Amino acid sequence: MSVTYREALGAALLDALAADERVVLLGQDIGARGGAYGVTAGLLEAFGPARVRDAPSSEAALLGVGVGAALAGMRPVVELTTAAFLPLAYDQLVHHLAAARALSGGALRVPLVLRVPQGAGARLGPVHSANVEGLLHHIPGLRVVAPATVGDARGMLRAAIADDEPVVVLEHTGLYDLVGEDDDGGVAALDRAVVRRAGGDVTLIAASRMAVVAARAAETLAEKHGFAATVVDLRSLRPLDLETVRTAARGANGRAVIVEEGWPNGGVGATLAAALGGRVVRVTGADAFVPYARALEAAALPDEDAVVRAALPLARVRDRRAIGGPDHTMTIEIDMEALVAARRASGGRSLGDLVAAAVHELLGPFGEAAIVTDGGAVTVLGDNRRTSPRLPAATLVFGPVKTSPAAVDGAVTIRHLATLTLTLAAGLATSEDATTLLAALRERLEAG
């Protein structure tokens, strides 16, 4: 049956309330208003105010009451309005909910479920846009799950309510309207990742809405670039199912892209990168608070294109080696604003003239140099002393201009970057030559 992610969560709560009288719901506006996102709609009418309790606007008090109810034998499900308010209950979260079992020598259990709507993308600004995966991943004593599908939304919430340990369920606000199949398959494992798609060129690893973004990126890699990507939906952020993740990454010879919406420092992605080793690239949100303006908000968040750009160089490694291509390839990014300034300083010379002059001067000693634009056009410069026109000694690929967020003092701005990839034919230079030449080329271009 097709239902929304929101409806699947509501069905799990309905199931639990009907099956166990110890289950109670606590939260702000969860009664008559059905919760901040409508997940609890209709439950007050079905079970009454003793089982579905509205709470005042105090996250610390709300979680504290929930912990007390759990210690008294109830099975509370506490809903926060937004993840951005979770730090207001940090003391109760760390020192009471998560620590109860350890501090009591295993005598106490706190079977509480904390439902946390999180995420950005709805233009709610920094106060109501938050990702707390890294924060929760750091705390012992908690289970933390982040369902990305309709079926997992119902199955994992149902399993969380039945668990005797505290479980945090992260519900991305961008998934509430997601439609999918809910076959009422019972409870879902709270500690297992799932491989959503299999492929041998690169592995994409993500959770929650980023698992959906990774799946779309895998489709693009297959349809537009001919590469097969494995997609791993983590589902559980604490504990991490490292066995499944490592097995999937080994299938692509260790080439992996880890995608997360939150800030880049620390957190789930950093833990996975350290555990995997190999050729791992991380795609994260900007190191800044999420802006309100639509363009800046989009620039601060990972999207499908960012995942594809990160995955392509890893996926192409096998192809280059298979066809015996040049060994020495390096890539840099050129700041387009600096190029525009250089054009003005040089009297309005065209960008093509700037690139051609710089390439001719720097790469001429290697023989013919080919400049390849993103559209596939090729210009051959230099002479024929060391190679034929069909196999230039130096190939410079001038890629597309892309936008990239830049976080400065906690604020997000947008930069325009062009990718330059230099390949020097094997036997004519070293990798150090490629690195040095690219650095000199960037300096020359940005100087005009």
Image: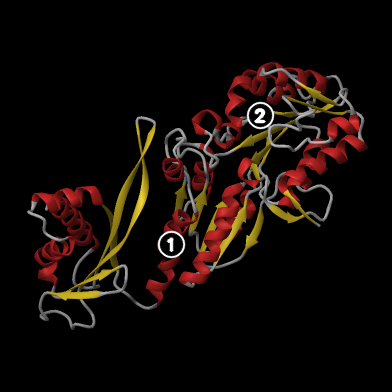
- The answer to whether residue 146 shows anywhere in this view is yes
Instruction: Say which residue appears at 70% left-offset and 19% top-offset.
Output: 96
Q: Looking at the picture, which amino acid does disc 2 mark? A: Thr
Q: Please tell me how crowded label 2 is: few (under 14), some (14-19), or many (20+) other residues with Cα within 10 Å.
A: many
Where does the image place residue 373, in percent across and percent down from the top left?
27, 68
Where does the image place residue 150, in percent across and percent down from the top left?
73, 51
Tally of numbered discs: 2
Q: Which residue is mark 2?
A: 81
User: In front here: 117 or 186?
Assistant: 117
> Furthest residue to the front?
32
User: In front here: 278 or 412?
Assistant: 412
Front label number (1 vs 2): 2
Where does the image place residue 61, in percent across and percent down from the top left?
70, 16
The picture quadrant where one finds residue 138 is: top right
Q: Measured along the vertical axis of the image, is residue 55 above or below residue 254?
A: above
Q: Secondary structure at mark 1?
A: helix
- The answer to whether residue 238 shows anywhere in this view is no
* Horizontal side, residue 87 vs residue 193: left or right: left
Pointers 1 and 2 in contact (CB under 8 A)? no
Q: Looking at the picture, which amino acid does disc 1 mark? A: Leu
Q: Measured along the vertical axis of the image, is residue 145 above or below residue 278?
A: above
Q: Please tell me how crowded label 1 is: few (under 14), some (14-19), or many (20+) other residues with Cα within 10 Å.
A: many
* Horizontal side, residue 199 vs residue 190: left or right: left
Please tell me which of labels 1 and 2 falls first in the chain.
Answer: 2
Instruction: Say which residue appears at 76% left-offset and 47% top-offset.
Output: 189
Q: Which residue is mark 1?
A: 314
User: In front here: 127 or 378?
Assistant: 127
User: In front here: 358 or 234?
Assistant: 358
Spatial CA distance of label 1 from label 2 is 40 Å
Q: Measured along the vertical axis of the image, is residue 119 above or below residue 220?
A: above
